[in-house]
Image (tube, rainbow, N blue to C red):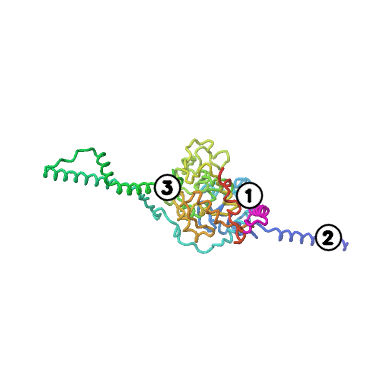
Amino acid sequence: MIADLGFKATKSFLTACLVLFAVQGTAGIWDDGNIEEGQALFNANCASCHKVTNEVLAAPGLAGIADRWGASEELLVQWIQNPQGAAESGDSYIKSLVSRYVPTYGWMTAQAVSAEDVKNIMAYVQNPPDAAPVADSGSDCITVDELPIEEANNDSGVWFVMLLVLFLIIAMAAAGVNRSLTNASREKDGGALLEDLPYGQRVKMWAWENRVAVSLIGVFIVAYGAVLGYQGLMRVGVVEGYKPNQPIQFIHSVHVCENEVDCKYCHHSAYESKHAGIPSTNVCMNCHKAVKKGRRYGETEIGKIYEAIGFDATSGTYVDGEGKNGYASPQDTYDGDPIRWNKVHNLPDHVFFSHQQHVVVGGLQCQNCHGDVETYTVGRVAKVEDINQLVDKYPGLIELSKPTLTMGWCIECHNKAEIDLASSGYYEEIHHRLKDHLRGNEELRMYMEDDKITVKELGGWECAKCHY
């Protein structure tokens, strides 16, 4: 009897230890997340609508969420992955969230994140690295009225042509005066008057009489024309400063700088495609279902989004219901005109460029090619001089000299950009192949003598890399 009781007590003790070990070994959603990874995930998935403070952006701030979350951790993950699915669970706390926030802000868009991702996001939300007091709103953000005005491009060739025409007019007038004075003098002396010849013949006669001067002037004109022609040919395809008008006055500085929306939240295809992509109206509505009045243009420009997608701002509902997905745009039922954005960055058809390769593998920042987007109104093609000014502001930017979006600009970057071979299996594999191919070769020793590898040295100057 005593032995049996001792066995049961020992069994209960071991069970309790196992349970305690399991609880301690499996961290909760609020514990042990990676703050740095969480910050990247938050910027990519959450920052367009939420702030880590109590400030309301397009949805409530997330400060103190660990203390006020009243449902299970599993429901928190489900709430982020599938809000409407979490609402169907019947949990009273989830119901209170729906009744309190959905009428004002609309349904949160389902996020493609894992439970581990949520843990990392919560770690960042609870411990944001930059938790210092925020400076005055917009103090570092250029507003519309503060944007620099681009000076007109005064082409010296135009002035040269104008001066040449003016010189010819003066020369013809002087020739006419000289002819009149000569005829007056001859008539006084009783001599024969000059023959009244057409201007063309007069010019020929004058050119022959002054053929040395005319030859020098001709050589100068031909040389100057050749220089202008060469400069003109070198500007073919150069579109620096190109800034087309857009159907909606979208202000990058408000979204990127003031509201701290990550570029790749809207241009998410940069992670997985050749093209960064123009955000669909659905992406705009993730925030603007709640944000109905802009800081610059009020309701005017946001109203164009509503008109395109069929959203009634007064009632907070879509014109023809809420579509097949329940929360997405009913574009299958609403017969509206889409927003026709004007493309800014255009490459020739024979040029291959992949955002995914440069962003994911190369680790480039948007500013490397697009400049300081957080100071822009509408999108534009940045000038190389503007990008070079950001070298101290954004670590990793390379100072270049060729015009942006030209072949010279690309190959100059590939020649200067250094590669961390340990950053990617792709780079490691290419490096191994290079070593096997050039083993004992003088070219390999030349590559390695400066203890760095550039994109060029790993094949970044091969024609087929960028041309079809």
Where does the image place residue 157, in percent across and percent down from the top left? Answer: 35, 48
Return the disc, 3 or 2, that comes first in the chain's sequence. 2
Return the disc, 3 or 1, that comes first in the chain's sequence. 1
Which is closer to the viewer, label 3 or label 2? 3
Circle 2 is placed at which residue position?
8
Where does the image place residue 158, in percent across and percent down from the top left? Answer: 34, 47
| Residue drawn where x is 73% and y is 58% of the image | 22
Return the disc, 1 or 2, that comes first in the chain's sequence. 2
In-front residue for pair 307/195: 195
Magenta part of the protein: which range?
Answer: 423-445
Circle 1 is placed at which residue position?
78
Please indicate whether residue 170 sits to the left or right of residue 263 in the image: left
Which is closer to the viewer, label 1 or label 2? 1
Which is closer to the viewer, label 3 or label 1? 3
Local packing at callout 2 (Cα closer than 10 Å; few below 14, some 14-19, many 20+) is few
Local packing at callout 3 (Cα closer than 10 Å; few below 14, some 14-19, many 20+) is few
Residue 41 at least partly seen = no
Q: CA distance from mark 3 to mark 2?
A: 96 Å
Q: Is residue 105 above or below residue 5?
A: above
Judged from the image, the secondary structure of the residue bearing numbered disc 2 is helix
Marks 3 and 2: CB-CB under 8 Å?
A: no
Q: Amino acid at mark 3?
A: Tyr
Q: Amino acid at mark 1?
A: Gln
**Quadrant of the rendering where the N terminus is positioned:** bottom right
Q: Is residue 69 above or below residue 325?
A: below
Q: CA distance from mark 1 to mark 2?
A: 40 Å
